[in-house]
């Protein structure tokens, strides 16, 4: 029986590392079953995504929406809410920035870019506020409402790009190009990396100050820890839930805005390849730490970025990467259960 206090202190740090290493080990077994060399495969995967110029640029591009959306999931978790609607909020944020990029013309970039970002944040925030209101006022479970709103958002964008927003003579559903003045600048020349990653890191820093160094952060944590006690402490639980869910939706909306403004420059039917669902895994893997979210977002982005190169160079199917992501989530869930049992046993001893 483990009672070592130092070991318990290190558990939140060790658990994610053990989960990732375990997932990579099982992934190596899958690579062996595919009759490939796991060392070669992992070398190609991480060299391409982290050490090569263009690969690292691609990693930063994929990290941007993952980081924005993961921050949204994390801030909701701090208040005890489960935001499963990041995918739909990405779509709404992409729609908001697209409308500003298409229909607001003649503005300088210094005004047009912030305006499009605000629209992306606002559309996502509204989509997050809806389940927040339903939870706070009507008592409807936010997991159900955020999940169902994903399908509404995806199908809404699909309808729009197939009908009123479809570009003339477009061979597939997508909108016209947004204005040049609404496009985010490239930060690594001749790569896909754009200024969205800088904005995402700034958002992470602001969120850290908000959650750790401000009265609002205390209020959010109090609601998440014990809503009843927070109510008796004269904290408006309902308003806090709606505020937090709006903030979560707005951050995910910025993920969609960055995809349109920094990468695709138009609204496509498939805005996100599942970033909203990856963000849930990232937030849980990071154990509520904002720095952990940044590092885990980088890890997941590196997996996505190097997957195709690994397939070409090491003859390993891309699906192995998705298996590694799923295994990481599985192992972190197991580690959380083990950690809870260790703490329970330790408390029983005391």
Image: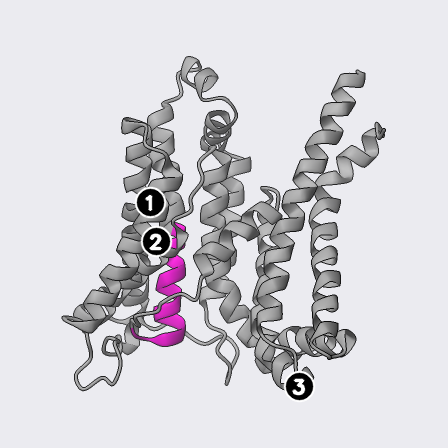
Residue 226 lies, with reference to residue 49, above or below; the image says above
Residue 256: percent from left, percent from top? 37, 62
| Residue at screen point 60% across, 60% down | 325
Q: Which residues are magenta?
A: 251-266
The residue at which mark 1 appears reads as 128
Q: Secondary structure at mark 3?
A: helix
Relative placement, left or right, of 316 versus 199 is right
Is the C-beta separation of discs 1 and 3 under 8 Å?
no
Q: Estimate the spatial distance between the alpha carbons at disc 2 and disc 3, rounded to whole Å.
A: 36 Å
Is the C-beta separation of discs 1 and 2 under 8 Å?
yes
Q: Quadrant of residue 35?
A: bottom right
Q: Secondary structure at mark 1?
A: helix
The residue at which mark 2 appears reads as 89
> Do we see residue 299 in this rendering?
no
Q: Secondary structure at mark 2?
A: helix
Badge 1 or badge 3: first in the primary sequence: 1
Identify which residue, 178 or 10, lies in the foreground: 10
Residue 143: percent from left, percent from top? 40, 40
The residue at which mark 3 appears reads as 313
Q: Crowdedness of circle 3 by 10 Å Cα count: few (<14), some, many (20+)?
A: few
Residue 260 lies within the magenta run? yes
Residue 72: percent from left, percent from top? 45, 48
């Amino acid at each position: 029986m483990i009672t070592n206090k130092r070991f318990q202190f290190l558990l939140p740090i060790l658990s994610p590392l053990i989960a990732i290493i375990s997932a990579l080990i099982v992934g190596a077994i899958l690579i062996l079953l595919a009759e490939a060399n796991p060392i070669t495969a992992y070398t190609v995967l991480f060299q391409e995504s982290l050490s090569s110029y263009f690969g690292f640029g691609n990693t930063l591009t994929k990290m941007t929406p993952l980081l924005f959306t993961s921050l949204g999931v994390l801030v909701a978790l701090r208040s005890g809410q489960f935001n499963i609607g990041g995918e739909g909020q990405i779509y709404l944020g992409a729609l908001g920035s697209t409308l500003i990029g298409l229909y607001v013309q003649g503005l300088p970039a210094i005004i047009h870019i912030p305006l499009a970002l605000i629209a992306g944040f606002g559309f996502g925030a509204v989509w997050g506020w809806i389940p927040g209101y339903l939870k706070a006022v009507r008592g409807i479970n936010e997991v159900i409402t955020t999940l169902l709103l994903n399908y509404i958002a995806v199908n809404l964008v699909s309808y729009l790009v197939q009908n009123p927003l479809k570009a003339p003579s477009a061979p597939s559903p997508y909108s016209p190009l947004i204005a040049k003045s609404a496009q985010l600048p490239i930060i690594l020349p001749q790569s896909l990396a754009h200024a969205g990653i800088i904005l995402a890191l700034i958002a992470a820093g602001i969120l850290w100050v908000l959650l750790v160094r401000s009265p609002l952060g205390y209020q959010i944590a109090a609601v998440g820890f014990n809503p009843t006690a927070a109510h008796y402490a004269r904290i408006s639980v309902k308003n806090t839930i709606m505020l937090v869910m709006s903030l979560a939706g707005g951050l995910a909306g910025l993920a969609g805005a960055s995809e349109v403004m920094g990468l695709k420059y138009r609204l496509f039917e498939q805005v996100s390849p599942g970033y909203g669902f990856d963000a849930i895994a990232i937030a849980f893997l990071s154990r509520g730490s904002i720095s952990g979210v940044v590092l885990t977002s980088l890890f997941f982005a590196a997996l996505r970025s190097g997957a195709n190169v690994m397939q070409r160079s090491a003859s390993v199917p891309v699906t192995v990467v998705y298996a590694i992501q799923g295994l990481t989530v599985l192992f972190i869930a197991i580690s959380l259960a083990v950690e809870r049992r260790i703490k329970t046993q330790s408390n029983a001893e005391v």
